[in-house]
Structures are given as C-alpha cells and as structure tokens.
Amino acid sequence: MKKQRERSNKMRTYHRYLGFFLAGIMAVYALSGIILIFRDTDFLKNEYKNEKQLEIGLTQEKVGEALKIRNLKFQKSEGEIASFENGTYNTNTGMAEFTTKRLPLVLDKMTHLHKAKSADPLYFLNIFFGLSLLFFVLSSFWMFLPNTTIFKKGLYFTAAGMILVFVLLYL
C-alpha cells in the first residue's frame, strides 16, 4: 500500500509539472483548433490584393500552379483578360491580379503550428505534445488509489467519454 501511494504521489508530481509546462502550448492548440473549425469561412480573415508577373499565354492549369490556387478555372475570357474566381490573368502581358483571404499573422502561425506535417520542423513539437497528452491520460489513473470511490467514478466518466466519442464518430 505504501509503495502504491509513493507511485501515486510521483505520478501526481510529474502530471502537475508537465501540466504547468504545457499550459501555454495547450492554450495555443485550443485556440488554433477552434479557429481551424472555421477555415472554410472568412471568419477573422483579411483580404489581400496581389499582383504577380507570370509567363505569357499560360493555360488555366499552369496559372493555378503558379499562383498556388487549387482547381483554378477560367470563368470567362474577354480579349486578352481571362477571369477566374477572385482575379484575372492577362494572356498578353502575363500579369495576374487576384485577391486572397488570410488570417492575421499571429493566428496564421498558430494554425500552421496546429497542422504541421512531417516535412515541417515543428512536427517534433506536435509529437511531443501528443505524447504529453497521452501521458496525461494515463497518469490520471494513478492520481487516486484504485479502491477509492473517486477512482471508480473516474472510470465511469472515462467510459462515458469514450462512448460519446464513438457515437459522434459514427453519426
């Protein structure tokens, strides 16, 4: 029993200090996660006007590649001006004028951190953060002795949370 209590106290200590260390990161991930929910809208986004000199006479696929606009489609052409959603491309001069909508710099950096890929240097932070969250999950089961009422209630809440996630996943 004494050994169990010592292990429980050690887990509490690790859980507490890792929690304090990660509090700022968790706040950033929470905010950027909420913002990412609205990524298909213009919520908090600012409009920017852009001009870019491209090669002359490009096809719509090549214009899309050069401007980094996926599935770009010319909607109409009047003389040398080809129009697409949010912009135009002059086939004679190669000048493209278009508008983009982006989050303010700080929010953009936060959301970039949240969705870092393996090619991004920030992915180590995402792995560390994910493993830390997994540690929080597991260490929470050592916070209370197994034969206590609060531990048993905790298991019921854990089961309810898991059931809720599965129900929401399959709706």
Image (cartoon, rainbow, N blue to C red):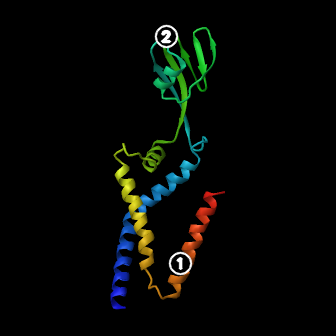
Q: Is residue 52 left or right of residue 5?
A: right
Q: Dot 1: within a 10 Å radius of its alpha carbon, few (fewer than 14), some, or many (20 or more) residues?
A: few
Q: Residue furthest right?
A: 171
Q: Position of residue 63 (x, y in %)?
A: 50, 21
Q: Position of residue 126 (x, y in %)?
A: 39, 54
Q: Residue furthest bottom?
A: 1
Q: Position of residue 168 (x, y in %)?
A: 63, 60
Quadrant the C terminus occupies: bottom right
Q: Residue at x 50, y 11 (%)?
A: 57
Q: Which amino acid type corresponds to the residue marked 1 in the rendered image? A: Leu
For label 1, the residue is 155
SS under mark 1: helix
Q: Is residue 128 left or right of residue 101?
A: left
For label 2, the residue is 93
- Residue nearer the viewer, 85 or 138: 138
Q: Is residue 100 above or below residue 131?
A: above
- Residue nearer the viewer, 9 or 90: 9
Q: Position of residue 160 (x, y in %)?
A: 59, 72
In this rendering, the label closer to the viewer, 2 or 1: 1
> Residue 55: which quarter of the image?
top left
Measure the C-alpha gap from mark 2 to mark 1: 68 Å
Q: Earlier in the sequence, mark 2 or mark 1?
A: 2
Q: Which amino acid type corresponds to the residue marked 2 in the rendered image? A: Thr
Quadrant the N terminus occupies: bottom left
Looking at the image, how many numbered discs can be counted on the residues?
A: 2
Q: Residue at x 57, y 77 (%)?
A: 156
Q: Dot 2: within a 10 Å radius of its alpha carbon, few (fewer than 14), some, or many (20 or more) residues?
A: some
- Residue nearer the viewer, 42 or 163: 163
SS under mark 2: loop
